[in-house]
Image (cartoon, grey):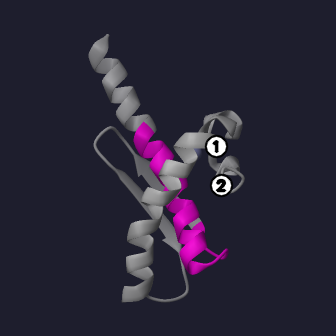
């Protein structure tokens, strides 16, 4: 079924997005960043995390540009190496 495949691909893209976002947050804000939840579906992703202070404007600017760079790098060389097709324990080693 074509629709099922499109839905699955969209969900997978958002799932990969959580890994990219997790890596971007750690790189920008520090290794203490911890994922506290996420919602992934074909329409969107939500990523909840813990951090000790409000994200300032400079950090936000860096965060917004970093996932694009990381996702390009990931697509080129790293995505296939995620343990269990990119599940949580692979999110750090994936980058
Ligand atoms: Zn995952």
The residue under label 1 is: 78
Side (left or right) of 25 relative to 12: right
Q: What residue is at 49 percent from the left and 51 percent from the top?
A: 71
Residue at horizontal 51%, vertical 69%?
Answer: 49
**Quadrant (top left, top right, bottom left, bottom right) of the C terminus:** bottom right
Q: Secondary structure at mark 2?
A: loop
The reply, left or right, for residue 6 in relation to residue 94 is left
- Looking at the rendering, the stretch of residues picked out in magenta corresponds to 13-34
Q: Residue 70, how many percent across, how many down?
A: 52, 57
Asked whether 14 falls inside the magenta stretch, the response is yes
Residue that label 2 marks: 95
Q: Residue at x 54, y 80 (%)?
A: 51
Q: Is residue 36 visible?
A: no
> Going by the image, does 36 lie left or right of 82?
left
Q: Which mark is residue 53?
A: none
Q: Is residue 49 visible?
A: yes
Q: Residues within 10 Å of mark 1 (few under 14, many from 20)?
A: some
Dot 2 crowding, Cα within 10 Å, few <14, some 14–19, many 20+: some
Q: CA distance from mark 2 to mark 1?
A: 7 Å
Q: Position of residue 15 (x, y in %)?
A: 47, 44
Residue 52 lies, with reference to residue 47, above or below; the image says below
Assign the magenta stretch its main secondary structure: helix
Query: Given contact means CB atoms under 8 Å apart, are the residues at marks 2 and 1 in contact?
Result: yes
* Mark 1 secondary-structure assignment: helix
Residue at the extreme top of the image, as rendered:
1
Q: Is residue 91 left or right of residue 50?
A: right
Is residue 18 covered in magenta?
yes
Image quarter (top left, top right, bottom left or bottom right) of the N terminus: top left
């Amino acid at each position: 079924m074509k629709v099922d495949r499109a839905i699955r691909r969209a969900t997978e893209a958002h799932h990969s997005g959580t890994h990219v976002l997790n890596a971007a947050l750690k790189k920008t804000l520090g290794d203490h960043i911890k994922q506290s939840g996420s919602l992934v579906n074909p329409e969107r992703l939500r990523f909840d995390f813990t951090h000790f202070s409000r994200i300032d404007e400079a950090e936000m600017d860096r965060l917004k540009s970093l996932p694009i760079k990381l996702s390009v790098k990931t697509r080129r060389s790293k995505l296939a190496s995620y343990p269990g097709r990119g599940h949580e324990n692979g999110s750090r080693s994936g980058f």
